[in-house]
Structures are given as C-alpha cells and as structure tokens.
Image (spheres, rainbow, N blue to C red):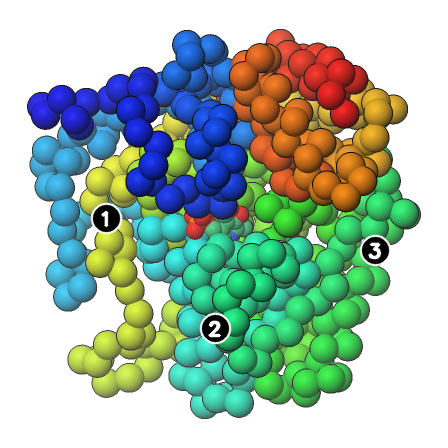
Amino acid sequence: MNADSKPSPVVQNLEEFWMPFTANQRFKAEPKILAKAQGMYYISDRGQRILDGTSGLWCSNAGHCRAAITEAVKLQINHMDFGPTFQVGHPIAYRLAERLCEITPEGFDHVFFTNSGSESADTALKIALAYHRARGDSGRTRLIGREKGYHGTNFGGMSVGGIPGNREAFGKLLPDVDHLCHTLDIERNAFSRGLPEHGVELADDLERLCQLHDPATIAAVIVEPIACSGGVVFPADGYLKRLREICDRHGILLIFDEVITGFGRVGKAFAAERFNVIPDIITTAKGLTNGAIPMGAVFVKGSIYEAFMQGPGHGIELFHGYTYSGHPVAAAAALAALDIYQQENLFERTIELESYWEEAVHSLKGLPNIIDIRNYGLIAGIEFSSREGNPGARVFDIFTRCFHEEGLLIRPSVDIIALSPPLIIEKAQIDQIFETLSRVIKETA
Ligand SMILES: Cc1ncc(COP(=O)(O)O)c(C=O)c1O
C-alpha cells in the first residue's frame, strides 16, 4: 500500500480541500479533525475520545466501523468492484432492492438507486414530473416545497428547499416552484415534548397555494416529515395527515424526504410508518449504508412505477440514472447495515430510549438563553437566543468547547444545537451528553 493511502491521524496540509458547508478560513485557524471512529466514539487528531452525539451527520445509526459492514464491503470489492446498471445488472443490487421493499410501507414495491440525499431529492422530483406526463397530465409542472425545508444542494432540491442561505448565492433556480409556510411556532409550542400540539392548520397553506396556482398545475409536494437541517422543526400532530388529504383531493403527489428520518431515527424503518401517513414517494440516503459508503434510494408506489411501464417494451421508460446507481460495494454495505438494524432491533431500541432521551434533553430547560427544546425519536433541537449582532456565535462556541475540551460532538445549526446519536447509544452515554452540555452551556452561553 502506498504510504499516502494509509489511514493517518495527522493532517499535513489543510489548504487544498475546499470544505463543504464550512467557514473554511475559520476552520483553518482552528481545525477540528476526526482521526478514527469506533462504535459510539470518534478519536480526534489530538487523541481525544469524542462521544458522537450526531451519528456523524445523521448517518451512522448503528455506530461506527461495524465489523459486519466492513467485511461485506471487503468481500464485495474483491468479488466485483464495480458493475454498471445501464442495460446490464448485477445480483447484489436486485437483492438489496428486494430487501428494502420488505421494510418500506405497504404499496412501495420499487426502488431507484442514487448516491446521496441530494440525488434522491432530484430523482423524486423528476419521477413526479414524468409520472404526470406519462399519464397524459402534462400540465402538472409545479413543485411545492416548504420554508426551512432541506432537500440537498442540487438544483431541484435547492429550488424546493426553504433555507434562504442555501439559495441566495445561486441566482436562477427552477421555475414554477412555491413553498408552504414552515411549522415552527415557538410562541405557542415552546418546550413541547414530542410532536407539538399547535399548528395542524398550517397544512391548509397547501390549499392557499392550490387556489393561487390552480391545483391542476401542481405535480408534487415535497416535505421532510421532520425538518432536521432547517433547525429541527417538527410538524404538529395531525399536520402530515392533513397534507396527505389535501394532496389526495387535488391529485397531487406527496413526497416524504426521509434522508434523515429513514432507517430507525424515529423508531420505525420510516417516519411515514411511525406517523401513519403514507406518501407516494420516499427519498432516503445516509442510514441506508450506515454512512459507510455513499448511497441513496427512492421508493415509489406500484401505481407510479406502472404508469411508466405502458410503452412498447423495448424503449427506456425513464431517461434518468447515475453511473453508480446500485453500486455493488455500496449495496453490500447497505445489506450488512440492514442486517445489523434487524438483528439488534435498533428501530425498536429508538422507541425504548425515546422517553429517557426526552427527559434528559428537557433537563436543560431553564439554562441561560435557551428559548426552546424540541424532541422526537432520537432527535433533539435546543434553540438559543442569538447573541446581539452575531447569530450562531453562541452555539459555535458551545460546539468548539464540546469538541476540544469535553469530548462531545454536537451539530451547530446557527442558534440551534441538533442532536441525533447512533441508535446503539446507552443510557449512561445519554447522561454524559446532557451533563456535558449543561456544564458547557452554563459556562459559555
Ligand atoms: C432531508 C434531507 N434531504 C437531502 C439531504 C441531502 O443529502 P446529501 O448531503 O447526501 O446529498 C439531506 C442532508 O442532510 C437531508 O437532511
């Protein structure tokens, strides 16, 4: 092995890597380097053990460096490193598709593979547009997202996304896109436990957009069941059900972006099942392979797939795909991850831990500058008031102190701390997260 390709804890040169969603100049002045990972922990380049309160980036639901995933990847890469899926196929992609369709909500019986959450979002939007066209309803070209929504960074996902900072630098986005209002209502719902009580009527904003644009022009509505990247925002109890009803009334497809909520984060394979609201299309990535190899997947109902399968039989039905759709090594990682999730009952474990997690996160109530605490499944958001003229600074200081001095990885999101630990977390580690946070918030915030 070339010395350059061996894992090393030391970064020699920070310059050339243009880091994503990072203040690059600030980072270079004070880098935070993860050198190694195992189970619930990272090890930093300074040798500090860091408890992972974020599953990396909402990915590693079964914890890090799981031997079964590593072995499956090794076996597959030795057996067949790559095989295309355009006009030829390979067994492991079919096996994974079959396994996945066993855990999707009833009626979802086909899967389109991608490499990321962003690609899953754009794939879902394209399938929705092409579906209506395939049925002769080609006037349905409008896409509806939601304020504070995040569907990745490609042009489709960015256009339906609702985080202003992710859009403002890029000029032209997709035309014919509109947004529902977001569901954050701290005034009425502050410190709610689980889904908030107030705000089911916010779903009626879809009726407003239907009246504004003519519902017959709307192809699809895409929402995250829980808007995580936009600030850990939960829908009121009943909101998603009402969205579903309005979509049904007007023939609009409903897409759930489950890139974060998929694979156990809220106690079922998918949030759709936990909330008992079944969309038409589900997008996933991240936990699909436990984060070990990039892969995404888009699940569609049989009726959607069948709408495309009406042609003469020898023509390509959907002009869409990625070189690495169904990549064999990623598929091996995904199959091994699914085995772990099932063998260790990790989705059920989320439900078992949920109330302990809720008590622990709400124990921070009353600490300086905290204006809201929100939780569901193994997700929590802790929102602070902004420092005068310097939004985000308070939480960034907490993040830095936790990383370097306390051995805890949290996710800063402007004035919100987002938490989403691996589902293998022990109660003692939950205690550790909140004891640490309590101390750091008192001293820093
Ligand atoms: C809901 C949702 N959709 C899409 C994405 C984009 O995924 P990726 O970064 O893999 O492209 C993310 C990433 O956090 C996400 O949370």
**Position in image of residue 165 (x %, y %):** 60, 56
Position of residue 405 measured from the top left corner of the image (x, y, whole percent): 58, 12
Tell me whether the residue at label 1 lies in contact with that at label 2, contact meaning CB atoms closer than 8 angstroms. no
Mark number displayed over residue 128: 2
Residue name at image x 23 percent, y 30 percent: 72
Q: Which mark is residue 445?
A: none
Instruction: Indicate the quadrant containing the N terminus: top left, top right, bottom left or bottom right.
Output: top left
Judge whether 144 appears above or below 66 on screen: below
Q: Badge 1 is on which residue? A: 327
Q: Amino acid at mark 2?
A: Ala
Q: Residue at x 10, y 33 (%)?
A: 78
Secondary structure beneath disc 1? loop
Closer to the camera, 319 or 4?
A: 4
The residue at label 2 has a CB less than 8 Å from ligand 1: no
* On screen, residue 298 above or below 370: below
In percent of width and height, residue 249 lies at: 69, 77
Compared with 142, 295 (above or below) is: above
Q: Is residue 376 above or below residue 233?
A: above
The extreme right residue here reads: 188
Mark 3 or mark 1, earlier in chain? 3
The disc at residue 199 is: 3
Rounded to the nearest angstrom, the CA distance separating label 2 from label 3 is 28 Å
